[in-house]
Image (tube, grey):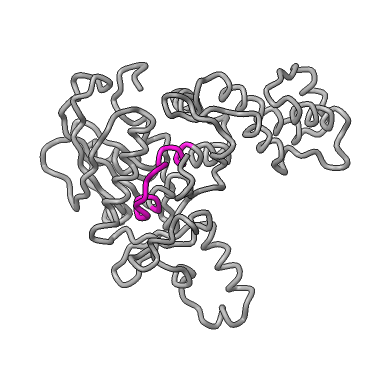
Amino acid sequence: MSEARDFWVASGHHLTDRADNGGLVVTDGFLKAYLARPELMPPEEACPVERGLHAELMAHPAMAVPADVLAGIADADARENFGLFLRFRDVLLAHPTLEAAYRAVFSGDARWLPPLFVQQLTHLIARNAFDGVDDPYVLRAAECLFRPQRVSVQDDALLLADQEVIATHEHSRHASPLMAMLGGPAVSELAVLNETNAAGYHARSDAHDLVFNLNHRTHGRAALGAAASRWIAHLTGVTLAFEPVETLDEAPAAWFIAFDAEAAKIGNAVWSGEALAPEEAARVVALYRFTLPDDPRIEERYRGRPGFALAAETTDHILTLKGQNMAMGLPLIDGAS
């Protein structure tokens, strides 16, 4: 991993190894970090089975756990938490890299996987995918892969601010008479990523406190498109060039990629030829066109054909990109990656 310009340290990438193909490999240290989470740390009142299992796993994180041992945990929540962790761990250990495990999970029914695990796994794989990237605008755009964003408009700028950071700021402001008196959206209390502060992005990247201007002429939607392209290429090996556009061409597209769940709904409507209501169209925050490459991993009938991609905010102005939708959203030949 690059050390001089490290970023997203909280992803835990230092706890993994790297395979010859560049993918991340699970280590005991990585699994122990999960076992140290509050959800799995036995409280003082935990039963002997729970405390004993946790101690054994901390010593041997990859050990097999018999079903009767898991069933012997008295507390139902603890039993469920350990069960989910073990299922997640076993999936990761069954594949040569975290990337391969990610593809395998999202090639099937992933509803069993808690959103927190999805976010953390995406964060970690994204740290690997963007290793060596120095463009702070692309990196800030890539945060959208694993951090939901609050969308707001100020002076014609379409701003993305980290939802969790905004919630913290809003809580602090409401708790302070002075902040409440000042009013205004919490996003105005944060700095927008620009030429002045961009050089310091790497050092403050784990704070997630820089606002991203999606309308920026050169570093806005183009940076988000570049981030999407790198993410997809890392997980599939297929490189797409996402070109920001204001409207779609009249020529019919052969494929589309939805960056999030809201975009999937809108994209399906467009794909079906339905007319979008103005409020639906207004929720599209980024629109791209691309051409499916002449790549043997792409189904032959789609190679060289045009497509479009989009991202959309919810009705309550939240943008939650789905990295799994983007990575698994290509017409790949079965088994290709």
Q: Is residue 316 visible in the rendered structure shown here?
A: no
172 left or right of 274 in image: right
Q: Is residue 24 visible in the rendered structure shown here?
A: yes
**Magenta residues: mostly which secondary structure?**
helix
283 left or right of 122 in image: left
- Let me know if residue 138 is in the magenta part: yes
- Indicate the position of residue 25 as horizontal and vertical percent values: 53, 27
Give the image quarter of residue 335. Answer: top left
Above or below, 173 against 98 in this view is below
**Furthest residue in direction left, as rendered:** 251
- Indicate the position of residue 39 as horizontal and vertical percent values: 71, 41
- Let me know if residue 142 is in the magenta part: no
Q: Which of 43 and 74 lies nearest the eye of the viewer?
A: 43
At 13% from the left edge and 44% from the top edge, which residue is drawn? 249
How many numbered marks appear? 0
38 left or right of 114 in image: right
Q: Which of 194 and 64 lies nearest the eye of the viewer?
A: 194
244 left or right of 87 in image: left
- Indicate the position of residue 309 as horizontal and vertical percent values: 27, 41
Q: Quadrant of the C terminus?
A: top left
At 71% from the left edge and 18% from the top edge, which residue is drawn? 64
Please give the range of residues in magenta: 125-140
Above or below, 68 against 75 in this view is above
- Indicate the position of residue 101 as horizontal and vertical percent values: 50, 25
At 62% from the left edge and 26% from the top edge, which residue is drawn? 89
At 82% from the left edge and 24% from the top edge, which residue is drawn? 72
Q: Which of 230 and 112 lies nearest the eye of the viewer?
A: 230
Give the image quarter of residue 14. Answer: top right
